Image (spheres, rainbow, N blue to C red):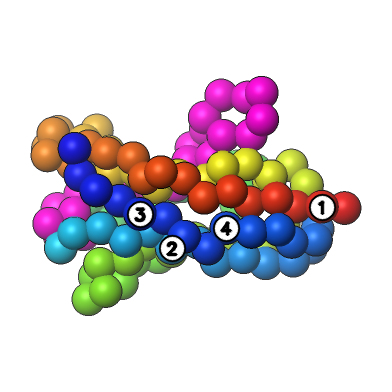
Amino acid sequence: QVQLVESGGGSVQAGGSLKLSCVGSQYIFSNCGMGWFRQAPGKEREMVSITSSDGTTNYADSVKGRFTTSQDKVKNTMYLQMNSLKTEDTAVYYCRADPFYSGGNYACNGWGQGTRVTVSS
C-alpha cells in the first residue's frame, strides 16, 4: 500500500476555515486518483471529494461550494481547503489513493492515518 500522511486538522468555530494537507510519493501524484474521506463519531466513513487520475473532481453534496481540493505535484501534496465549516463537519479526515479512480491501478491503494477536525458552535 502507498504511504500517505495527513496534517492540518484542529479545532475551529463554526463559520471558520481549515486547510488539510496530504503528502505522498511522486508515483502517487503522477498516477493515482486520490480523495478525501471523513468519519464522524458513530458514523460510517464517507467520501468528501474524489479526483480521478484523469483530473475529474467530484464533491459530496454536503460540502459543495464550501470545500475545495487541489494538488501540488511539485510538492507531492494534496490539499483540502474547508470554508464555512459547520458542526456537522466534525470528523476524522483521511486522504486516500483509490485504485477504482486510478484506472484499476492497484498500486494506487492506501489510506493516511487521519487528522481530526472539530467544529464547535
- Dot 1 surroundings within 10 Å: few (below 14), some, or many (20 or more)? some
Q: Which residue is mark 3?
A: 5
- Comparing labels 2 and 3, the label whose residue is closer to the camera: 3
- Dot 3 surroundings within 10 Å: few (below 14), some, or many (20 or more)? some
How far from the left and from the top, in percent, is residue 59? 50, 47
Earlier along the polypeptide chain: callout 2 or callout 3? Answer: 3
Between the C-alphas of marks 3 and 4, the distance is 12 Å
Q: Which residue is mark 1?
A: 120
Name the residue rendered at 15%, 63% in the picture: 26
Between the C-alphas of marks 2 and 4, the distance is 9 Å
Q: Which residue is mark 4?
A: 9
Earlier along the polypeptide chain: callout 3 or callout 1? Answer: 3
* Front residue of 105 and 112: 112
Q: Decide if residue 103 is in sight here.
A: no
Between the C-alphas of marks 1 and 2, the distance is 21 Å
Name the residue rendered at 41%, 43% in the picture: 113
